[in-house]
């Protein structure tokens, strides 16, 4: 009975930017279709989701900065637990994907609103919170990618040495 060999490579790979782009573009299309069919049935676009996503982005940016300092063992920075870093990395991967979905959906909504603003008076009032949602979602993607990068284990000096 052959057992699969275990490799020492990490199983958690860095987020592929193309994945975020494809998911974002799919969300643009979905946002456009949904809003074009159901815009009259939904209430005014609220500001709260944009503020909430932006607050999460700020939290992840702060976490990225402190995590990087702790991993690099900068003076005054507390030690970091390896399990916490793994959790942060998973949070970052999930947040970058969620941010990409939100950004895409908001972009689809925003493009539709901009196209309809001369025809529908409600569309004009929904543009500002939708644009804020786009900015907040993109900020979440950036903060999540920064947090993911901050969670990488630095190379050891002996990893750079080549064997003779």
Image: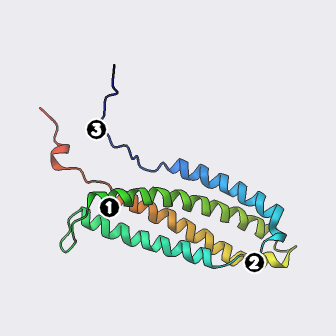
How far across and how far down the image is residue 16, in percent?
48, 48
| Structural distance between the alpha carbons of marks 2 and 1 | 40 Å
Residue 141 in the figure: left or right of residue 115: left
> Residue under circle 2?
44
How far across and how far down the image is residue 4, in percent?
34, 27
How far across and how far down the image is residue 82, in percent?
27, 57
What colouring does the structure picture have?
rainbow
Residue 163 in the figure: left or right of residue 131: left
Above or below, comparing residue 130 to residue 94 in the picture: below
Q: Tell me which corner region of the image, top left, top right, bottom left or bottom right, holds residue 52.
A: bottom right
Q: Residue at x 66, y 52 (%)?
A: 26
Q: Residue at x 65, y 53 (%)?
A: 25
Q: Residues within 10 Å of mark 1 (few under 14, many from 20)?
A: few
How far across and how far down the image is residue 97, in percent?
53, 56
Q: Tell me which corner region of the image, top left, top right, bottom left or bottom right, holds residue 40.
A: bottom right
Q: Secondary structure at mark 2?
A: loop
- Mark sitting on residue 8: 3
Q: Residues within 10 Å of mark 2 (few under 14, many from 20)?
A: few
Q: Mark 2 vs mark 1: which is more N-terminal?
A: 2
Mark 2 and mark 1 in contact? Answer it, CB < 8 Å.
Answer: no
Q: Nearer the viewer, residue 44 or 115?
A: 44
Mark 1 and mark 3 in contact? Answer it, CB < 8 Å.
Answer: no
- Mark sitting on residue 84: 1
- Mark sitting on residue 31: none
């Amino acid at each position: 009975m052959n057992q699969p060999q275990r490799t020492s490579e990490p199983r958690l790979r860095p987020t592929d930017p193309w994945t975020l782009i494809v998911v974002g573009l799919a969300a643009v299309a979905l946002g456009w279709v949904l809003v074009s069919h159901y815009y009259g049935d939904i209430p005014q676009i609220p500001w709260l989701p944009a503020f909430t996503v932006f607050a999460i982005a700020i939290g992840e940016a702060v976490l990225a900065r402190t995590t990087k300092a702790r991993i690099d063992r900068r003076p005054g920075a507390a030690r970091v637990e390896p399990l916490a870093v793994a959790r942060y990395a998973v949070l970052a991967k999930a947040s970058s994907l969620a941010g990409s979905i939100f950004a895409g959906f908001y972009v689809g909504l925003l493009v539709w609103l901009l196209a309809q603003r001369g025809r529908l008076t409600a569309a004009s009032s929904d543009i500002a919170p939708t644009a804020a949602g786009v900015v907040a979602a993109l900020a979440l993607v950036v903060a999540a990618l920064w947090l993911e990068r901050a969670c990488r284990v630095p190379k050891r000096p002996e990893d750079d040495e080549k064997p003779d």
